[in-house]
Image (cartoon, helix red, strand yellow):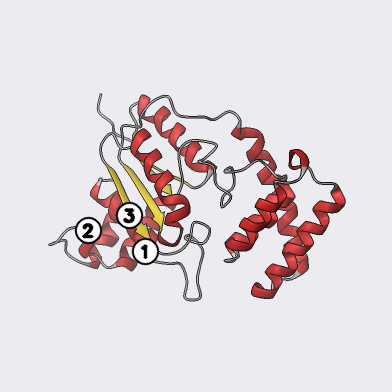
């Protein structure tokens, strides 16, 4: 029969690989799926790069967590230099003392630009290193997909990270996604902060792009459509809608 249920899957980093595999499985049982990729590839490991997790040999959960924190706070060049230097360790293995020294050195770099309390940073390292270790243990089960996802796909590229992530993410999506059309949209920010709140709240470009994509593809439910129709008529299509209303509609749809 026809596809009646509608599901939108969003993936970032390794989650993009999981989202792609899930989309394939749901598509096989006649679920209408839209796949949304946040500046990420659908294969693991990603293309070799010293700028991103998975693009170089694994450094251990605590080290990777500290490096990710630096990237998230705009210290990407520092993170890249540190990753390059750590490749000199035999088999990328550090002693517990060396790991502790590295993590604290990264903390003082972060504290100088963020004012982050040390207690908060230590809790972050504890929690994030556990998650990253679990991700690393699961990552070995993935490789290149064995087929193309036939449903609609949106690839959102962080404008400030195009040189590091854009080409590989675009190539992977073109190869393994978009049987019904692949859409690529650039949004502000870097790969590491494109979804973060800024000083005035959540950046509007990303939810607006997702909302317009889902609206064009018929993925909004009744409640979300009521918000949209109450906001403005649709003489020129989705792009004419107020961004905040679209973002609100997207939020309602995902939590509804």
- Asked if labels 3 and 2 touch by Cβ distance under 8 angstroms, the answer is no
Q: Residue at x 51, y 62 (%)?
A: 193
| Camera-side mark, 2 or 1 | 1
Residue for point 45% across, 33% down: 22
Q: CA distance from mark 2 to mark 1?
A: 14 Å
Which SS class for mark 3?
strand
Quarter placement of the N terminus:
top left
Of all residues shown, which one is farthest toward the front?
88
| Residue placed under numbered mark 2 in the picture | 238
Q: Quadrant of residue 102?
A: bottom right
> Callout 2: helix, strand or loop?
helix
> Outermost residue, left direction?
235
x and y percent of residue 246 in the render? 31, 61
Disc 1 or 3, which lies upstream in sequence? 3
Q: Which residue is mark 3?
A: 185
Q: Name the residue beneath numbered marker 1.
A: 205
Residue under the image location 25 percent in, 28 percent down: 2
Question: Relative to 164, is 137 on the left or the right?
Answer: right
Residue 119: image location, x then y, percent:
78, 66
Position of residue 90 in the picture relative to residue 54 (left or right): right
């Amino acid at each position: 029969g026809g596809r009646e249920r509608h599901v939108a899957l969003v993936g970032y980093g390794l989650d993009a690989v999981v989202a792609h595999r899930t989309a394939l499985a749901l598509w096989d049982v006649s679920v209408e799926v839209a796949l949304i990729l946040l500046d990420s590839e659908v294969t693991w490991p990603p293309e070799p790069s010293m700028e991103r997790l998975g693009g170089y040999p694994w450094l251990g959960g605590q080290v990777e967590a500290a490096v990710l924190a630096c990237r998230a706070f705009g210290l990407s060049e520092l993170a890249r230099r540190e990753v390059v230097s750590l490749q000199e360790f035999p088999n990328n293995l550090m002693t517990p003392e060396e790991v502790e020294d590295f993590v604290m050195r990264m903390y003082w770099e972060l504290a100088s630009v963020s004012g982050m309390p040390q207690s908060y940073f230590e809790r972050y390292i504890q929690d994030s290193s556990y998650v990253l270790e679990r991700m690393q243990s699961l990552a070995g089960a993935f490789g290149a997909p064995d087929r193309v996802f036939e449903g609609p796909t949106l690839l959102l590229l962080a404008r400030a990270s195009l040189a590091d992530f854009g080409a590989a993410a675009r190539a992977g999506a073109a190869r393994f996604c978009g049987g019904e059309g692949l859409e690529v949209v650039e949004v502000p920010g870097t790969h590491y902060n494109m979804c973060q709140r800024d000083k005035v709240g959540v950046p509007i470009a990303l939810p607006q792009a997702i909302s317009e994509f889902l609206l064009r593809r018929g993925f909004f439910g009744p409640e979300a459509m009521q918000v949209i129709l109450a906001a403005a008529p649709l003489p020129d299509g989705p792009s004419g809608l107020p961004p905040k209303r679209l973002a609100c509609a997207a939020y309602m749809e995902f939590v509804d």
